[in-house]
Image (cartoon, rainbow, N blue to C red):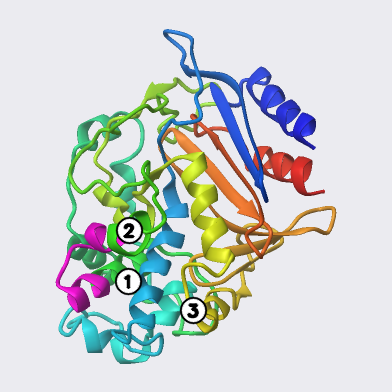
Amino acid sequence: MIADVQRVLDRTVAAELAPGMVAEVRDGDRSWFGSAGVSDTATGRERRQDERFRIGSASKAFTATVVLKLVAEGRLSLDDTLDKHLPGLFDGSAYEPGRITIRQLLNQTSGLYAYSNDEKFFAKGVGAEWFQHRDDAYTPEQLVRIALAHPPVDEPGRRFGYSNTNYVLAAMIVERVTGRTFDQELVRNVSRPLRLTGTSLPVADPGIAGPHPVHYSTLFSADPKPEIHDATRMNQSFAWAAGGVISTTTDLNQFFAALFGGHVLPAELLREMLTTVPTEGWIPGTRYGLGVFEQELPCGATVWGNGGATYGSWCYSMGARDGGHRLTAQVNGDWAPLSVFDDVLAAEFC
């Protein structure tokens, strides 16, 4: 299996689908790290196991976990509606916060519009515009206001609809309930107890502290042979708790192993997290839970975890439902097809 995983890494880089690719496998007491390509095309620096990278929407698993920890403490209920914790926020909009629950935020069935789909917002992140706006800072309220300017995409609870707005609102509720910032609650509930020393959620720092690969991006260019840019430094407040976390392959494996292994949440809340809804029109073969999803591979094996993409970084962290067998892979470019992660998962789990 390990040889097959390494072949996927080598093949991905040889096909110029990424400057570099890494994968780390954890299976009981066995662990392995493999790499191909480089962290920096200018210097030829090789990829390293301790490198930190932006994990995109894999951040949602951390956010859902923080929310569920507060449920375990009796400070929230998954059936709480948004008007209870965020009064006045939806005034003047087409939304009914008394009908939208925290559970619907976490399983992406709230019907809330995704602010990232707003035409003006999206345009600021494409091509030359990205360089003009890479340091823009957004407050969570500003992101939500962008979404609320659009009508709902569906009735609350009716169907799955992927939206970063859901996770911005979930993190805002965490701050309202605790009186602390979301990143402080992430440290208290997840990073510190699990000793995730390479995991953080920067609030204003546009850089990546510690060793990291250059994050290479096409900046959403439609050109068949796009120019590649260094997108490592940027303010990710535009994604915040929905996609702004930085981590490592080791930390991601440790987090999901502990989470699915029952060492983070009470059993009844882990069952809630693993209760899934259909994801028609999203990633094939998947169902979505509370910040995590399950995926059936072509060979019939099912893996659990999350993945994410942002400028210059794609990652996938998936494995067995009991947490005992994990694989985390990352590429430091954003033009590879999703199939490279299907291939690396199949190499290990099929």
Q: Residues within 10 Å of mark 1 (few under 14, many from 20)?
A: many
Most foreground residue, 96 or 192: 192
Most foreground residue, 290 or 109: 290
Q: Main secondary structure of the magenta part?
A: helix
**In the visual, does 231 lie left or right of 156?**
left
For mark 2, what is the residue?
241
Compare marks 3 and 1 and give the one earlier in the sequence: 1
Residue drawn at the location 33% of the way across and 55% of the way down: 192
Measure how far apart labels 1 and 2 are at the Cα level.
Answer: 8 Å
What's the magenta region?
A: 173-186
Query: Mark 2: which amino acid?
Result: Ala
* Furthest residue toward right: 299
* Front position among marks 2 and 3: 3
**In the visual, does 239 lie left or right of 307?**
left
Measured from the top left, where is residue 143 in percent x and y? Answer: 24, 60
Decide if residue 335 is in sight here.
yes
* Furthest residue toward top: 43
Residue 123 lies in quadrant: top left
For mark 3, what is the residue?
266
Query: Mark 1: which amino acid?
Result: Ala
Residue 67 lies in quadrant: bottom left
For mark 1, what is the residue?
170
